[in-house]
Image (cartoon, rainbow, N blue to C red):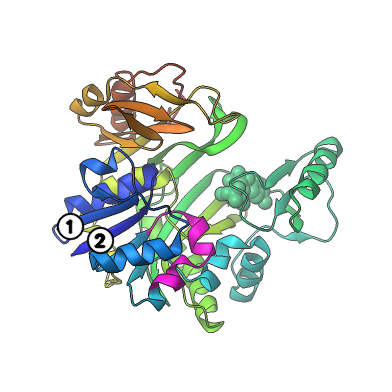
Amino acid sequence: MRVLVVGSGGREHALVWALSRGGGVDDLHAAPGNPGIAALATCHPVRADDHAALGSLALELRVDLVVVGPEGPLVAGLADDLRRRGIAVFGPSAAAARIEGSKTFAKDVMDAAGVATARTLPVAQPPCVLKADGLASGKGVWICRTQEELGAALHSAEALGQPFHAEELLEGPELSLFAVAAGGLAVALPPARDYKRIGDGDTGPNTGGMASFSPLPDVPDSDAAEILETIHLPVLRELARRGSPFHGLLYAGLMRTEDGLRVIEFNCRFGDPETQSILPRLESDLLPLLLGDLAGPPAVSAGAAVTVVLAARDYPARSDDRGTPIEGVDAAAATGALVLHAGTALHDGTLVTNGGRILDVVGLGENVTAARTAAYDAASRIDFAGMHYRTDIAANV
Ligand SMILES: Nc1ncnc2c1ncn2[C@@H]1O[C@H](COP(=O)(O)OP(=O)(O)O)[C@@H](O)[C@H]1O
Ligand SMILES: [Mg+2]
């Protein structure tokens, strides 16, 4: 089988790594990929948002499957454009990807499907959450506990120029549950947790994600089937009923409130960096799942994975720190950790930073504590000027 993975971050490196381990793929390609991916796949200089060029590349390479990483191209109809050209794709149509592309659409689908989510408020009043409707790269949600926060949020929301709504402010730990879906059929992957804030103790601004781990102490892998049954499957059936069946990865961002699980949002693709902690736990091959063979849930190891993101100087305020040499990747990998590239480049054969989140260090172990120790041991061997990472990931788990 020949597979083309679209994207260039740590999530795509994890997908390429998982596909390269399984027996089913004998020829791996990526567009555009990154220097880490290039060790496992042939990278092609085609951007993830260039639908026409991706289609031509897939036809030229005669790939059996295209796996789309990021949400932007999916919401913009990449999967439709490729399917129209006869190319098999893992990733939803634009119509189904609206579950992520429009928060109002997602609420409407959840209401129709009877899936519990935060109540929409007719009037914005603290405490509440303001949410922009469309894709906003993590910058379209404002938590408002006070009138001042609400005032500032209304200002920012209006400045974004998208429709927005106010909803009930929920409290509780969050978790992510991924389901591989093909229309009304789906299987769940093990639950994971991500860390969005830049600073230890969940302080400072939100980021694209600074860390993740799996399994969770409070939501065991064995809970996944029931969550799938009560949350993902009703939504998948509702999407199919509306004539837009979902084929791809349906990601539920959930909050465990005192009244039970509530959906915070759905995403239409693998989450970054949860994917980096979930895929290493899969014991069965990823490829059959992506091809729609959903006969049963995949075999999952009892072991744990902890992912720590190494970010560039000034991230997330600025993500333009590029060209700084990176040292110690081989030494980190020699410890047995998985070092995934998120924002790297090669300059004359030297590995350098390429902005934002630079590397994802995935520690593996028989439990979360061991995996955490492994991740931090490996991370301590890597260095680049300005490097920073959270030190409290999966502590006290
Ligand atoms: N109703 C809510 N109550 C409490 N916190 C929320 C609520 N909605 C969102 N959040 C917080 O904001 C974060 C981002 O919201 P989310 O809907 O996932 O948007 P996005 O990922 O598109 O930025 C969530 O992970 C959660 O921490
Ligand atoms: Mg989110």
Q: Decide which of tag 2 and tag 1 comes sooner along the chain.
A: 2
**Alpha-carbon span between mark 2 and mark 1:** 7 Å
Exactly how many numbered labels are in the figure?
A: 2
Rendering quarter of residue 212: top left
Rendering quarter of residue 180: bottom left
Q: Is residue 132 left or right of residue 231?
A: right
Rendering quarter of residue 179: bottom left
Q: Is residue 77 magenta?
A: yes
Q: Is residue 391 left or right of residue 363?
A: right
Which residue is identified by label 1? 27
Foreground: 265 or 8?
A: 8
The magenta region covers 68-82
Q: Are marks 2 and 1 in contact (CB under 8 Å)?
A: yes
Which residue is identified by label 2? 3
Residue type, numbered disc 1 = Asp
- Find residue 22 and report its horizontal and vertical position in percent: 17, 55
Type of secondary structure dominating the magenta stretch:
helix
Residue drawn at point x = 82 percent, y = 43 percent: 155
- Find residue 221 and report its horizontal and vertical position in percent: 36, 52
Q: Which quarter of the figure is the N terminus placed in?
A: bottom left
**Few, some or many residues within 10 Å of mark 1 (<14, 14–19, 20+):** some
Res 258 visible: no
What secondary structure is found at the residue carrying circle 1?
strand
Foreground: 345 or 136?
A: 345
Q: Is residue 305 magenta?
A: no
- Find residue 379 and report its horizontal and vertical position in percent: 33, 23
Q: Is residue 43 left or right of residue 323?
A: left
What secondary structure is found at the residue carrying circle 2?
strand
